[in-house]
Image (cartoon, grey):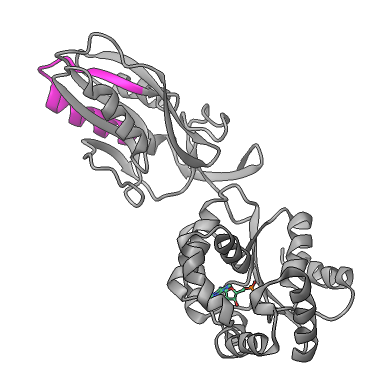
Amino acid sequence: MIRLHDKYFKPFLREAQILEAIDKIAHQIAEDYKDKVPVFVGVLNGAFMFVADFLKAYPHPCEVSFVRLSSYQGLTSTGIVESLLDIPEDVDGKSVIILEDVIDTGRTLKQLVHLFSNTNVKEFKIASLFYKPEVYNGEYTIDYVGLEIPDNFIVGYGLDYNELGRNLREIYQLNESHMINLVLFGKPGAGKGTQAGFLKEKYNLKHISTGDVFRYNMKNGTELGKLAKSYIDRGDLVPDEVTIDMLKDEVEKNPEAGGFIFDGFPRTAAQAEALDNFLESKDMQVDATIALEAEDDILVARLLERGKESGRSDDQDEDKIRNRFDEYNAKTAPLRAYYEKQGKFHSVNGIGEISEITERLGKVIDSLE
Ligand code: AMP
């Protein structure tokens, strides 16, 4: 395991595997271009090592040049692709073969195609050392691929995490297993949001409250907000498809988080299963589900009190509050068994001083590792 900035990375591809993939591409291209003199155009910065080893493996006459593009910031593709070094001159009439280190969404590729569309190249082909078929949504075929890889964040062999890691001879992938992901469980008014506020600071976690995201969207009049409003006003649950997609988006938006506190999610069996599957696909997991326990009468009193200050439509009258408890008992309470089966369920007394309750939660979290 190695550390770059604040993240840990574990070995993924050995040098020999990388060189073997490069050899394969070099021989395929050599076969197709042995009678021509192609111009290989490396995409900086990431592809510099690939280009060097590729050229050593390429047995016929060829030219080489570079373009420089930048689309990554941190761990996630920003979607903004800048051209920092323009296309080489004198490519007209020549066969250009792009050498790219990795193709994921295809946004960089699109920009490259666009850059070269203003030239009169004879042929334009793409060779990529790594390719992530799961996330590729471009329309161009990739002519030569070294290795197909899953959608994990990788560094090494020219690829960086915030500029570190390019000099590594091997490819490493992000190790997420040191993350802590918590589900805060409990009825409305149990104090999940309040406690999440403290826990996120103490453990450096990202707090995702689905209720807050809905309220934010309602306040801003988005389509999602309009859709959720009628359910929320009645104290009903918003449909699973909507909530699950939204939750995934929120996680995707925070690739650099050291872990998550899920507050108010999952609330149904379908959501719990979707969360497990989604996290697994990212090499993550729920580490603990912690329930804040309190009696209904205490919760009703708390919520009515909160409703006076917050103005939340669903905190105003007892009928709506009781409806939310009914929803909880029918759909959410059964998740206790789901997490107990996984050995992840913990129960904490939610009555007392706020700081006392934070301490109780901290004890559970500290016992996890
Ligand atoms: P909360 O702030 O967590 O009490 O959520 C307020 C309201 O937002 C709930 O009563 C639901 O209508 C909706 N909501 C929040 N989270 C979910 C979820 N996981 N599934 C469905 N609806 C939700």
Residue at the outermost top position? 90
Q: Answer whether residue 320 is visible to the viewer in this image.
A: yes
Look at the magenta stretch and give its main secondary structure.
helix
| 25 part of magenta stretch | yes
In screen coordinates, is 29 left or right of 279? left
Q: Identify which residue, 84 or 128, lies in the foreground.
A: 84
Q: Residue 360 in the image: x percent, y percent?
A: 83, 73
Instruction: Determine which quarter of the picture holds residue 287.
Output: bottom right
In screen coordinates, is 81 left or right of 360? left
Q: Identify which residue, 239 or 329, lies in the foreground.
A: 239
Q: Which residues are magenta?
A: 20-42
Instruction: Determine which quarter of the picture holds residue 1.
Output: top right
| 165 part of magenta stretch | no
Residue 327 higher or lower than 223, as above or below: below
Q: How many marks are shown on the rendered structure? A: 0
Q: Residue 263 in the image: x percent, y percent?
A: 65, 69
In screen coordinates, is 94 left or right of 360? left
Residue at the outermost left position? 35
Q: Answer whether residue 367 is visible to the viewer in this image.
A: no
Residue 134 higher or lower than 127, as above or below: below
Instruction: Determine which quarter of the picture holds residue 112.
Output: top left
In screen coordinates, is 239 left or right of 312? left
Which image quadrant shows ligand 1? Answer: bottom right
Q: Which residue is depicted at the point 36% across and 33% down?
A: 108
